[in-house]
């Protein structure tokens, strides 16, 4: 493998075991890990570190930066070993979530595009060690990334030392998919020259250099991606409702026939929407997004789309195997960009992205909570949804109208936490229907949402709240503050939002 | 005046009285008015319409679009006459505010940069008649704007008919300050070529054409700008705190010596900050903002800055007279752009704007309410703050730590409305001090805010809430939902947030 994967012989003497490499990581350090939404993250070294800490019984606390969520070998193992003091900008691991909500880990839930600039502007403490999964290292010591770019370029740039995990489970055919464009900091920043989804504007490697590389570890561990839940009836209905909305927009001349570049969050609803597009009349679609899941690969496979820009390919284990078998087909259809570019407001506004993301709960005025269960408990994080939602052309949030077997209404009088404000949320879709909030005042929005999106079990309760709020005081955004969060308190006390 | 102001003789026969022109406006129409933050708005025709409706006793309902707030001749007179059914995207008139909060006017409080694209994308009903204040009309029927651009280019482009108010109270020396750059809609949008505040990328006139002009009205009415409240002690302290923050950032190498382009909201705190910069060691400052008030003119006058990009010049009546006297000095130092460009996320992110805006209230986790008093009552609107806050390099929100003689704490357990989320708010400044929230988890933010920014009268109460919330349940963003809005309810019932 050596000459193919490590293209400068000088680097051979930096090869070592994961255990040895893990010794570079010391208590109090800031670690930057490659990877974005269980894809392209380091595995061997993080596992070795967790193992070492557990065995030694010594306490260790580090700050962990990433692109987005990492696999269980990092967030899970480190969370369990109590290594993580602080974590940013996103995570989805159940073990670590527990630690966050127990107050043991300080978690910064950030706009993903902000995370890069916080680092580059020197606002965040700098990276001591970056651990980067690579396909290969070039003769000049630059990194050829695997299946995700995320914040790897920024970590490498800002790190003292870089540990490279060369992963032979990722075939060399992936080389060439990356397009690494690096922004200067203001005031020297130039326009990002992207005017089309498929444009290549950078290099296929991430700049690093021989000197920064402190260790090279060989591994063949696969990404621990999650298998997808099968599409259920609710997701299918949401997908149908979105397609109906798209058709209407095209009919009204507000969207081109091939729509605008699609951004889609992860999860079963997102998958259902994309599968729905595969079976639809829409053609020549493009995607400008942060994660490619199975369904987006399918969109290429079925010929409905020819171009996807993303920062990560994160298919299910089965989906990834299939992807690798067909790599020649996919290779020129997917471009992997740094998350500062995939999630950049400049590009989102220019291309006019259709942003489709999932809400945890919404309120009758169109505020969306994407992150906090009952106002306090972190679910996952905002991820890139805010980067796209404020700056796209159309911003859609989806949710099933109820949760917990109907004991929670996903649409409430007032959300217990706001991630997307009434100013950003344009269209709401549940299995019940579509609420188009654009051009509507708060009162108009309330009726649109209650009439079109709320589950019948909760419709009378919400109408009752709204009508009484209308009589209560100021009538711009009618509320009764004593009752606004009562549905949540009731759920906390009785296990249901129902009276 | 004719040949100077109306440069095509064919247009002379379209000149008429304001009363005659107002007849073009019919019940049910959508009207787009030039103007941004009492500057450059039409006056004679709106007043004539209000007069006519009042005299006739006939009901009339129209939808009114603008750039931002308009003067009393429109929002005041039309609000009072009950003409406005719907209003967007921003307003500040007391009379109209009353109508909005009484539920008589549907008000859409929008990101200002969104308003342009909602119109251009065909999401908002199209403009029937645009009423545009002009310095002059070119030979080709194009409009030379006065002291604000706002959404005038989009209104003219999307209108069936245009009424032009040629205002001779605005001297011809203003010609040349405008720089009108028009965006295509996606998928044809190109990068906005701005890489420096002072760059000119467009024309000095707004495209219209002879045919669209339905009426020309001559007027010499002055903008009814508001005089500024004198800077008080609280504003001065906030200004000092911001300057201290800037110094620290420069020291740490996180900001260049001449800072980054400044965006500043309106009001006495904003003015105090800019006056503070006049008296500071900072030099070669630039501003990329939406409104230029007296203090920003002073920044040019004192030589601390040489370049301001804005969409509106909105000085006090005294300040504006002085500005006109020195127009030769100012002319090449101020560029007037459409609000789609002044507030564009692409430019805000690229230039790395320092966004400084005022909050109505904030909570201990860094969520900001800019618009709603006690959750329901509209104050003014979000304006451009969201355009800049999400996409700038540094986002600062300021407020006095208390309001209503101390009966309201501007920092509360949970805001009653969210305009800027925890993900966007980077720095909070009150007269008490500075809370730098960047890189901090919610719990770390809470202590930073309580310790640095809260008024001593409320500090123990907030600490008590926070500490009890910490024991209450999930510890990512500790809250007690039954109490989260209790301070507001208490104020509504007792007139004070104090126990």
Image (cartoon, coloured by chain):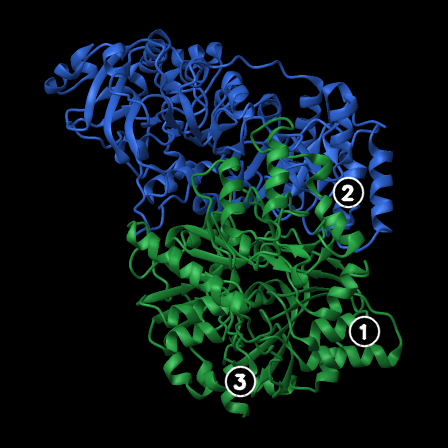
Chain colours: A green, B blue
Q: Quadrant of the C terminus of chain B?
A: top right
Q: In the image, A401: left or right of B190?
A: right
Which residue carries the number 2 mark?
A: B448
Element type where label 2 sits in the image: helix
Image position, residue B173 (x, y; %): 30, 17
**Residue drawn where x is 81% and y is 80% of the image:** A52
Q: In the image, B304: left or right of A199?
A: right
Count residues near mark 1 (Cα–Cα under 10 Å), then give few for <14, some for 14-19, many for 20+. Answer: some
Count residues near mark 2 (Cα–Cα under 10 Å), then give few for <14, some for 14-19, many for 20+. Answer: many
Closer to the eye: label 1 or 3: 3
Image position, residue A47 (x, y; %): 73, 80
Which residue carries the number 3 mark?
A: A318
Which residue carries the number 1 mark?
A: A81
Q: In the image, B146: left or right of B323?
A: left
Query: Can you see residue A428?
Result: yes
Residue A481 quadrant: top right
Image position, residue B393 (x, y; %): 56, 45
Element type where label 1 sits in the image: loop
Query: Can you see residue A182?
Result: no
Sequence order check, earlier mark of 1 and 3: 1
**Residue drawn where x is 39% and y is 38% of the image:** B340
How many angstroms separate mark 1 from mark 3 (CA)? Answer: 30 Å
Q: Quadrant of the N terminus of chain B?
A: top left
Of the numbered discs in the image, which one, if any, rests on residue B419?
A: none
Q: Nearer the viewer, residue B486 or A116?
A: B486
Q: Chain of mark 3?
A: A
Image position, residue A125 (x, y; %): 69, 56
Q: Is residue A30 above or below residue A133?
A: above
How many angstroms separate mark 2 from mark 3 (CA)? Answer: 47 Å
The verdict on a common chain for dots 1 and 3 is yes
Q: Nearer the viewer, residue A41 or A471?
A: A471
């Amino acid at each position: 493998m050596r000459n193919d994967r490590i293209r400068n012989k000088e680097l051979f003497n930096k090869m070592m075991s994961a255990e040895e490499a893990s010794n570079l990581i010391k208590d109090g350090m800031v670690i930057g890990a490659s990877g974005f939404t269980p894809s392209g993250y380091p595995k061997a070294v993080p596992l070795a570190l967790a193992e070492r800490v557990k065995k030694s019984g010594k306490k260790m606390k580090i700050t962990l930066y990433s692109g987005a969520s990492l696999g269980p070998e990092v967030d899970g193992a480190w969370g369990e070993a109590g290594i993580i003091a602080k974590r940013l900008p996103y995570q989805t691991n159940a073990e670590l979530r527990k630690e966050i909500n127990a107050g043991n880990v300080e978690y910064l839930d950030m706009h993903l595009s902000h995370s890069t600039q916080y680092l580059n502007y020197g606002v965040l403490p700098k990276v001591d060690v970056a651990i980067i999964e690579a396909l290969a290292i070039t003769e000049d010591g630059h990194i050829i990334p695997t299946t995700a770019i995320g914040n790897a370029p920024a970590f490498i740039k800002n790190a003292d030392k870089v540990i490279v995990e060369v992963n032979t489970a990722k075939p060399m055919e992936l080389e060439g998919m990356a397009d690494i464009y690096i922004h200067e900091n203001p005031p020297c920043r130039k326009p990002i020259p992207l005017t089309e989804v498929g444009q290549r504007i950078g290099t296929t490697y991430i700049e690093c250099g021989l000197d920064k590389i402190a260790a090279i570890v060989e591994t063949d561990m696969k990404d621990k991606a999650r298998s997808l839940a099968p599409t259920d009836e609710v997701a299918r209905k949401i997908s149908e409702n979105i397609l109906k909305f798209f058709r209407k927009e095209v009919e009204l001349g507000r969207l081109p026939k091939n729509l605008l570049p699609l951004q889609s969050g992860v999860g079963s609803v997102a998958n259902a929407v994309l599968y729905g597009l595969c079976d639809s009349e829409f053609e020549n679609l493009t995607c400008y997004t942060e994660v490619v899941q199975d369904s987006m690969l399918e969109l290429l496979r079925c010929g409905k789309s020819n171009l996807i820009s993303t920062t990560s390919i994160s298919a299910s284990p089965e989906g990834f195997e299939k992807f690798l078998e067909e790599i020649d087909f996919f290779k020129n259809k997917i471009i992997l960009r740094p998350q500062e570019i995939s999630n950049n407001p400049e590009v989102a506004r220019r291309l006019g992205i259709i942003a489709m993301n999932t809400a945890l709960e919404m309120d009758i005025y169109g505020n969306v909570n994407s992150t906090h269960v009952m106002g306090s408990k972190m679910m996952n994080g905002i991820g890139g949804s805010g980067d796209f939602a404020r700056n796209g052309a159309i911003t859609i949030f989806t949710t099933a109208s109820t949760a917990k077997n109907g004991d929670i209404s996903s649409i409430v009088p007032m959300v217990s936490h706001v991630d997307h404000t009434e100013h950003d949320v344009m269209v709401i879709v549940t299995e019940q229907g579509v609420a188009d909030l654009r051009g509507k005042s708060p009162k108009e929005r309330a009726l649109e949402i209650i009439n079109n999106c709320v589950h019948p079990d909760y419709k009378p309760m919400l109408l009752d709240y709204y009508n009484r709020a209308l009589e209560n005081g100021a009538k711009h955004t009618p509320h009764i503050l004593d009752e606004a969060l009562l549905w949540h308190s009731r759920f906390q006390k009785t296990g249901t939002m129902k009276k």
